[in-house]
Image (cartoon, rainbow, N blue to C red):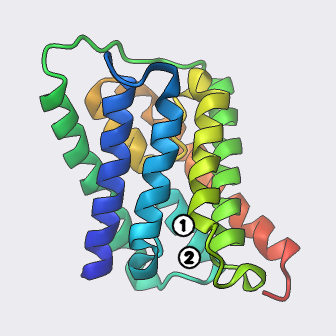
Amino acid sequence: MNKYLVELIGTFFLVLTIGCTVIEKGAGPLAPIAIGAALMVMIYAGGHISGGHYNPAVTLGVWMRGKCDTKDVGPYMAFQIVGAVLAAAVVKFFKVGVTVTPGEPAVGAALLAEFLFTFALVFVVLNSATAKGTTGNSFYGLAIGMTVMTGAFAVGNISGGAFNPAVAVGISIMGLSAWSSIWIFLVADFVGGAVAALTFKFVNPGD
């Protein structure tokens, strides 16, 4: 149960940071830095307990790679989504009265953007946090957080920069993304995570 709670807490603070920095009077153009930093510190805080996934697509990739028990996959994803929902509720309380216009990205571009950077994120997670060649390193949290930061800067204006199905739920509740677009995140992010796991296994055949 401890690891499930950690997944909830980490996802909560990631989504809370997204809402507070992106919605009006937030961090403006510096929001991706805060978001990447929030993920980084939560990974350092909980990585030794749960692995610090905070993302159903990461959980899928880590499971496919063989570093997450099958019995934990469902609970991890459920607690991550609960964390996102709770964070969205807090953001709506903080930002009460602020008008939020939901984004409706172009489908093709958003699918590709979400796929590419979710692939990058999960590929970095697997190589920095689960590979034999990087065992015991102290940089994994920074590498993972900076991947999300990079993606948010690069394609945030194209797809919304979720790279995470739980984040997609959170930003939909907050009104940052239209509910009609959530399938884009779910499809692209899970496929991106799965392809990253397959690629990791191909380039690390002995791991």
**Left or right: 52 as drawn, with respect to 138:** left
Q: CA distance from mark 2 to mark 1?
A: 5 Å
Res. 55 visible in picture: no
Classify residue 99 by image quadrant.
Answer: top left
- Residue 199 is tagged as none
Of 124 and 105, nearer the camera is: 124
**Left or right: 39 as drawn, with respect to 79:** right
Query: Residue at position x 19%, y 23% from top?
Result: 95
- The percent coordinates of residue 7 (x first, y second) are 34, 66
Return the residue at label 2: 63
Query: Residue at position x 68%, y 25% from top?
Result: 109
Q: Are marks 2 and 1 in contact (CB under 8 Å)?
A: yes
**Left or right: 53 as drawn, with respect to 170:** right
Tell me the amino acid under the disc marked 1: Leu
Give the class, few, some or many, for how many residues have Cα within 10 Å of label 1's Cα (few <14, many ≥20).
many
Query: Residue at position x 64%, y 67% from top?
Result: 139
Tell me the amino acid under the disc marked 2: Trp
Up-down: is 54 above or below 111? Answer: below
- The percent coordinates of residue 166 (x first, y second) are 39, 49
